Amino acid sequence: MSKESAETFESTPLNEAPPASDPAVENSSSANKKKKKKRSKNNIKNISLIYPDEKYPEGQWLDYNLKRTSEAEEKYIAREQQREQEWNDMRKAAEIHRRVRRNVQNKIKADMPLTDIANTIEDATRKFTGAEDLHTMENPKSQGIGFPTGLSLNSCAAHFTPNAGDKTVLRYEDVLKIDVGVQVNGNIVDSAWTHTFDPKYDNLLKAVREATYTGVKEAGIDVRLTDIGEAIQEVMESYEVEIDGKTYPVKPCRNLCGHNIAPYTIHGGKSVPIVKNGDETKMEEGEHFAIETFGSTGRGFVVPGGECSHYARNAGVQVPSSQLGNAKKLLHNIDTYFGTLPFCRRYLDRLGEEKYLFSLNNLVRQGIVQDYPPLNDEPGSYTAQFEHTILLHPHKKEVVSKGDDY
Ligand code: HZT
Ligand code: MN
Ligand code: MN
């Protein structure tokens, strides 16, 4: 035994004396010897009587062999720390999301321009994350807006946000989906709700809120995506809504989905259906999912249409700069300020980009950038959405974006 370990051994009090109240102590006193002759000399009895609180002394603690620590153990510890960091980043983004939405919920009024609503949300996100000026940030992608604020009205279910000059004003009769993204180190919280002023839409909102909660309840490690869709569909279709004297069944928008979220990637490759679709792919431990459902008084099917505002760089598509022509500077700015995070035209305007539309369209045509046009159900219909981001921990799931509002 080495000198050091011998010292370690001696400094570790093993076989500590049992508690003073223990009968074993009394037993050893000579005064009691005659009196207690009938009791067992060796005090062998159920050990729980000696340790009534069931807390037993710890053994000797020794460090592992240094070599083993530096290999398997260190890798394990690093991965564990990275997971804790990721979860903490998600909780920071979620806390910001709750504060951003509380702020806009207190300000939203009929007759507000959608541009003002978007700026209220996005300015608050920039302040909370310390991402007010992308030009002076050391790492402009380290935290901030996760994706463009969705402000989709009525039959438009998703992916509308105003472009420059948009004059759309929110009206009392509108059904507005507000979809907000916050990211910290690329960990994106994606959560949305539906705002209405008129109580005539209450059953539509209730159907979709309950459908989303059902998706959250069904989600879990090893759960098949089609089974989540089936449960969502059943709840959604159990509702109807009467609007202006006409009764509508609430239909899921069957070609809209939830999705997993990977770092700096809003769509990680898995889609969570909101109808039974036969996809037997399973959710896995450690994944993050956006659980979102859309209900409609229309067809329950969306088509792309209208002016595009949302875009994102396609991950892994690299193109020689000789092929970029006029789009070279624009792509450089996209890579610098957004990477693979979705962005919108307003964010390019803010960076000082001008007359970029031709270049942007070229990048879309070449597959370097993906466009996400507005998604619309039939004209005159009403669509609603609720969405939460969940984390699949080993033994429980965390609805990280949950608030007291929804
Ligand atoms: C795309 C672009 C964005 C992801 C869902 C969604 C808003 O419809 C697989 C399933 C932001 C998000 C997305 F700018 N989309 N969640 N919140 N939109 S999606 C999709 O394209 S891909 C769903
Ligand atoms: Mn969303
Ligand atoms: Mn989403």
Image: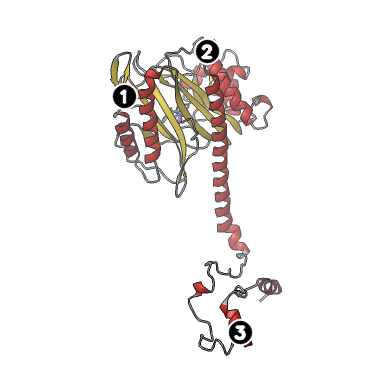
Residue at (31, 24) in percent of width and height? 250
Residue 36, how many percent across, how many down? 55, 86
Q: Is residue 145 above or below residue 352?
A: below
Q: Which mark is residue 28?
A: 3
> In terms of depth relative to the viewer, which is nearer, 380 or 64?
380
Earlier sequence position, callout 3 versus callout 2 = 3
Q: Which residue is mark 2?
A: 113
Q: Is residue 27 above or below residue 189?
A: below
Earlier sequence position, callout 3 versus callout 1 = 3
Name the colouring of the figure: secondary structure
**Residue type for callout 2:** Pro
Q: Quadrant of residue 292?
A: top left
Q: Which residue is mark 1?
A: 250
Residue 374, how many percent across, how many down? 43, 19
**Residue type for callout 1:** Val
Q: Which mark is residue 395?
A: none
Labelled pair 3, 2 in contact (Cβ < 8 Å): no
> In terms of depth relative to the viewer, which is nearer, 155 or 239?
239
Secondary structure at badge 1 equals: loop
Where in the image, quadrant-wise, is ligand 1 located? top left
Left or right side of 285 for 300: left
Check disc 2: other Cα within 10 Å, few if <14, some if 14-19, many if 20+.
some
Looking at the image, is mark 3 or mark 1 nearer the viewer?
3
Residue 263, how many percent across, how many down? 52, 37
Q: In this orientation, does residue 68 appear? A: yes
Earlier sequence position, callout 1 versus callout 2 = 2
Secondary structure at badge 2 equals: loop
How far apart in space, not on screen, are marks 1 and 2 (Cα)?
Answer: 29 Å
